[in-house]
Image (tube, rainbow, N blue to C red):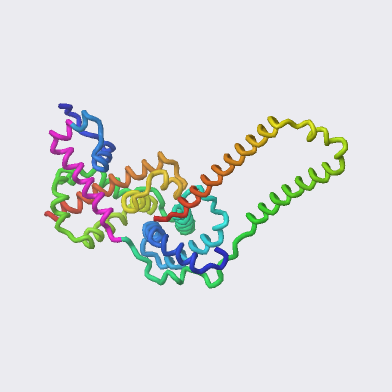
Amino acid sequence: MNQAHLNEEELQACALDGHTNQVAMEHVAGCGHCQSQINAYQSLYRHIREAETPLLDFKTDDLIPDRLPAINKEDSKEALYLYGFLLGTVAFLVIGLIGFWHTLRWVFMDITPFAIIIGLLLLSGLLIVQLVELFNTYRKKLSALKME
Amino acid sequence: MDGDRHAATLLVRRTEKLVAQIVFKMLGNHPDRKDLTQDIYLKTFRYLPRFRFQCKLSTWVAQISYTTCLDHLQKYRSELITISAGEELLLSNTCAQENAGDIPDASQLLSIKERSEILEKLSTTLPPVYRTLITLFHKEELSVDEIRDITGLPVGTVKNYLFRARKVLKESLLNHYSKEDL
């Protein structure tokens, strides 16, 4: 049997989850000193766990101000900029297309069914990636709001 | 939450225990406790739009509680993390270690209230940060990573403070029971 006592760190870990290395476990099994130290730590952990939770000695409703601060509109401004940018881009493309139709129409005339399928596949792929991203963000937000 | 009192009430109800733990452990029985708790929730409501869902909402509220209490203590220049000379002396007390086996049997006879009182008495000698970390880890069962998020301390520092706090408390506890037995 290993004669060296467990150090304080090993004692704490052993008392916390009962896990330490094999040599240390064998030592603990035959060492009254280490066992009593582990017992002391386990007793301490129990004391802490079972200690009464302090309660606020005033009504929690008092903690909510009469006028709750209004939500900062930074986020909605960001969204407004994004939608504005997208709308502007679409408008630019449509106006450009109408204005330069005679020059650009060969692009659409020569388009093959294969190119259309490739385009659609690409679009669907992007859409799926975006949906997965949205779902993950939603899940992350929900788990963040779970408070228990 | 724009003006939604129901959501605000729900937020307070769900986090008040954790906030109370932090406030009590950081400040003890301080007369400013109510004002400080009110300040914590005012900050929470004011900065809620800045919450980026990178951690649990309760962790974020706990983070506000911890920093608010820390600012308050720093204002009054309280000792935050230094273990007192008396406690260091206690760490080298070998008499207590010899009676280590007496703790569990003796403590099992005590009620939860009595045990709470003993722990409360012993932990008053610990600096506020140590008291808070011990409570968050062992009582609230938060992970070291969550405690890191709340306190802003590196993981290594959190583990080191927890280690030292447990050691001091264990020695205090041994000392307490060995004195009781005499």
Report whether B85 appears left or right of A82: left
* Residue at the front extreme, as displayed: A113
Q: Which residues are magenta?
A: A26-52
The image quadrant where one finds the C terminus of chain B is bottom left
Viewer can see residue A31: yes
| Rendered location of residue B176, percent (x, y) | 20, 53
Which secondary structure is most common in the magenta stretch?
helix
Residue B18 location, quadrant: bottom left
| Rendered location of residue B131, percent (x, y) | 35, 53
In the rendered image of this protein, does residue B55 appear above or below residue A106? below
Does the magenta-highlighted stretch encompass residue A39?
yes
Q: How many marks?
A: 0
In this rendered view, identify the residue nearer to me: A146 or A41: A146
Q: Residue sitting at 26 percent across and 41 percent down?
A: A17
Viewer can see residue B66: no
* Residue at the top extreme, as displayed: A1
Report whether B140 appears left or right of A113: left
| Rendered location of residue A48, percent (x, y) | 28, 53
Residue A39 location, quadrant: top left
Q: Residue sitting at 23 percent across and 62 percent down?
A: B113
